Amino acid sequence: MHHELPCWNRYGQHNKFIKMKNLYVPEFVEIDKVVKETKDIITMGFRHPMRALPGQFIEVSLLGIGEAPFGVASYREGYIEFTVRNVGNLTRALQSRKKGDKIGVRGPFGNGFPMTDFVNNDLIIIGGGTGVAPVRSVIIYAEKHRNQFGEVHLFFGFRSPEEFLYKKDLENWKRKFQFNITIDKPHRGWKGNVGFLNQLVEKSRLNNTRKIVIICGPPIMIEVCAASLQKLGFNNDQIFVSLERLMQCGLGKCGHCMINDKYVCRDGPVFRYDKTINLKD
Amino acid sequence: MSGYILKKEDFGKFIESLKEEYEIFAPVKKKTYFVFGKVDSAEEIAFEFINTEYSPTNLFFPKKEVLFDYNNTKINNKKEDITRVIFGIRPCDVHALIIMDTLFLEANFEDTYYRKKRENTLLISLKCNSAGENCFCESMGTDKLERGYDLMFCEQGGSYVVDIGSQRGQKLINELFKSTDEECIKELHCNKKLDMQKVNQLEQFAEHEGWKKESEACLSCAACTITCPTCGCFDVVDVPNLNMAAGKRLRVNTSCQLKNFSEVAGGHVFRETRDKRFKHRIYHKLVYFKKQFDTFMCVGCGRCITNCPAGIDMVSIINSLK
């Protein structure tokens, strides 16, 4: 038998290292802006020609501290924004970085939401806490392609008014879309909705005709919201969710984001909800 | 097919001839077990092994590997070009590399580090004379090897019958080798047999209570994954110098058997209970990888069984699923 390995087939002789893109090496960019959202959450922006689709993620590095995945929170040519909550070493260190400082970036990774498949549907966009970050890119996409979609219903849940993200955007979206927001517990001076997101969704009495639902948030929130939608007559194949795992390489190699036969980094992070039902750890 | 024959007395000279161009890795004896190590002469090479404690696939995805050095934002990932020969790699471990090629060399997601090592390394496989007590390569179909090697050695009396597997292998053939029509066939018989019918039905057993029961003995020590020739999961870790400006980014082997493997920001662990981690390894090897790449991620080398301090035997667990 005289089989050769695919690697030698493709590049001919061995021993000649063919220069190719090393997918593990970050590229350095200058932070263009830092917005303080809440006491422990910031949003950073940088210029970069990468084209990120709504729902994709990037890997952000501070050399010496580490690297972690962040959902892209923007949809804009030549510009990327991402939101960071202070939960660990890297995210804490990022809080102190300022405009002009350098960060390493890789990506974008993942599939993103299949926005072109959603054309001519109403969009119901549900985001809880920092789960609002990835759906922000979807909302901006919908704003930019307003005539492609019907009604846009937004449902946001935060712990309290102090935890609200993207306050300027919220004001803007309030005017443009069907806007719903709730906080977990009563709060002084808050006259709006109190309670969990799924209750708000149920109260809306939306029907499932020509509608696509996008949910981002903690696993339990996705579960209860999907259950509420089912009560309203929605099918699981109308619902798209973005799953969270700690993607370390983004290339389907390191194994951390594996759920059954799916790599969240490559096959996801966006999954149609009916296809996640059997994705049990 | 005509092959070559190399007399055992010429083996030392053959190794010497390789040394001019290559670093040589081969099985060496360490007290009570065997591992692959760098050798300078044929005398250092052990032949009486069934298989090595650790897998030679570690030479392609090491337990610890520098991805790059950095100094502020300057990145250096240039590495020396070292050409190597691995002598004595068993057919099952060559199969392990063929399997890992599908993962690491996948189009668009190619792992540069793996590719470079793969391209710079020649494999001289050595057929097994007999099977070990935990070998079940016969069940996995990995006892036979038809591709993936550069040369294949097969011990026959006072000589080795050598089969050429690639053009690179052909170039290693020198005047020490004589052509021959002799064939060297070793029929291996493994006592351990994995019930492949059960393996193909594994998905139906996903919620089986047996996983909980069987995993009670598991210590989550990761001996199974660290010795497995197809376990390549890793953490990406930065090791800075004291001044913080310069340092290295490494990838370090990790294991799905460890609790923090599936931990995300904020501390949530997706596979928190031992039975979930226990099942994940077996299902990744025999179900998930098969779905992704249409091949099993197990070569039946039995290292996970041999090295388990709790005596957990994946084969008998699967065989007894009802």
Image (cartoon, coloured by chain):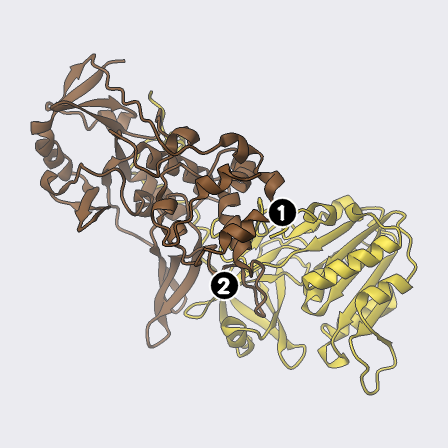
Badge count: 2
Query: Which of the pair B251/B153 is nearer the observer?
Result: B153
What is chain B's hue in the picture? Answer: brown
Observer-nearest residue: B189 or A43?
B189
In the image, taking residue A151 as reference, residue B88 lies left or right, namely: left
Q: In the figure, is residue B145 to the left or right of A236?
A: left
The residue labelled by disc 1 is B207
- Dot 2 amino acid type: Asn
Position in image of residue B89 (x %, y %): 27, 36
**Chain identifier for the yellow-coloured part of the image:** A
Tag 1 subunit: B
Kindly report the distance in space between the C-alpha atoms of the residues bearing marks 2 and 1: 23 Å
Query: Residue A117's image quarter?
Result: top right
Image mark 2: chain: B
Q: In this picture, is B200 found above or below B76?
A: above
Location of mark 2 (residue): B260
Q: Secondary structure at mark 1?
A: loop
Residue A35, given in percent of the width and then of the height, sits at 64, 76
Q: Amino acid at mark 1?
A: Glu
At 81% from the left and 70% from the top, the residue drawn is A172
